[in-house]
Amino acid sequence: MATPDRRRDVPRVDSVLADARLQPLLDRLGRARVKRSVSGALDRVRRGELDPGAAVDAVLADLPPRATALRPTLNATGVVLHTNLGRAPLSPAAVEAIIAAAGYVDVEFDLGSGSRARRGRSTLEALRRAAPGAGDAIVVNNGAAALVLATTALAAGREVVISRGEMVEIGDGFRLPDLIESTGARLREVGTTNRATRADYVDAIGPQTGCVLKVHPSNFRVEGFTRAVPITELGGLGVPLVADIGSGLLSPDPLLPDEPDAATTLRSGATLVTCSADKLLGGPQGGLVLGDAATVERLRRHPLARALRIDKLTIAALEATLDGPPTPTSDYLHADPELLRRRCETLAEKLGPHLEVDVVASDGTVGGGGAPGLTLPGWALAIPTGFAERLRAGDPPVVGRVEHGACLLDLRCVPAASDETLLAAVLTAAGA
């Protein structure tokens, strides 16, 4: 007896695409993405792995819920600026601003005169207000780009004077010496690994000096027999002083006494301050350059500035971050430990009938290279270690940390409004 030809039972691609259940997905994901999934399902039908009547169900199961592979995730690690989870979460005001800027907007247009206007002018005004002492500002696409633009405009073909103890490596293996030398500048190292003096800088400065660079070692600490030259001693050396403060604190914060801020650094004598926007500021990815108006204008006019400039969505989100309500980053850094404990106890009471759970003290961290060594006292749920992988595979994924033989779910960076979502995720992982 002849084997039935399965190809006769395979639906046509167009007929599957016409199914009413797929129409919302066609609108949201586009025809090409849905068609790829349909073709994959029909290949399975041809191989006998899938019943023809189940093709649409297979497509629905295969397609993502949104037009990006990025998945909103609950950060239960206790690390506020978790680089692998996108660093600073944006405030509702910043999210709303991004949506408003998604279409046509007057980003570089004066509606009154009908002529071209300065790009992102209201955002730059907000940045100058937030950083007293800054004569002007420019924003590029990340913190490294801010430093590259500054050293390129001031020292390409010349020397950048820097302490040996500040030749740092930033994330993913990028090293400061390589970054600066890529601009065409030459490094002039002064001092030793653990000690430098003002005299070291004075002796190194000459006709070939483009700028002095002062780098805050934001992701490590050197202790013991050490000495670094403060900004106040470097500001009057007759050449531009660029201070990279790293994590983007614009004004002093009592919680972070050892973290330099832009306002104080400028007041102490820096010509320019460079830093990130998506760390302690709590905004979108961006690199900030603040300081002397004439020097900032020199950077703005450099051809590299055009290649590094930010888009309208970042402009909008940054303005909303600067002028809007406190950011999630600020809220998480300053979270009340007693409130975190009560939230943990409430969740533990609900989880208790279904799995082994304890409420334990948990020290959070700033993350993102900010405030190394600083701990943020808080509380976490301690559940069996095996839950870590199951929670990461859930919807939404929950990322905790495995420590002391348990999976810890630290609530510092979990919004209180998401406690029920976290509860449901843990119960699902427990099979309850």
Image: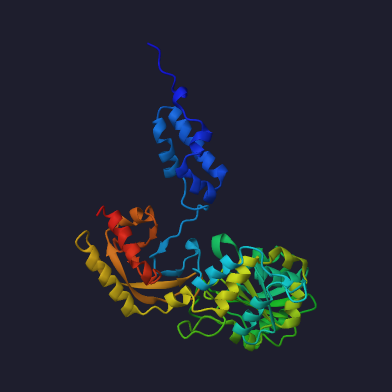
- Determine which quarter of the picture holds residue 300: bottom right
Q: Residue at x 29, y 71 (%)?
A: 344
**Relative vertical location of residue 63 with respect to residue 216 in this rendering, above or below:** above
Query: What is the x, y in percent for residue 20?
Result: 46, 43
Q: Residue at x 54, y 44 (%)?
A: 33
Q: Is 402 on the left-hand or right-hand side of 219?
A: left
In this view, the residue in front, 393 or 13, is 13
- Determine which quarter of the picture holds residue 195: bottom right
Query: What is the x, y in percent for residue 323?
Result: 57, 80
- Determine which quarter of the picture holds residue 380: bottom left
In this view, the residue in front, 262 or 44, is 44
Q: Residue at x 39, y 76 (%)?
A: 376
Query: What is the x, y in percent for residue 2?
Result: 40, 12
Q: Is residue 67 visible?
A: yes
Q: Is residue 230 visible?
A: no
In this view, the residue in front, 243 or 190, is 243
The quadrant of the rendering that contains the N terminus is top left
In this view, the residue in front, 393 or 43, is 43
Furthest residue in direction top, as rendered:
1
**Relative vertical location of residue 421 with respect to residue 280 in this rendering, above or below:** above
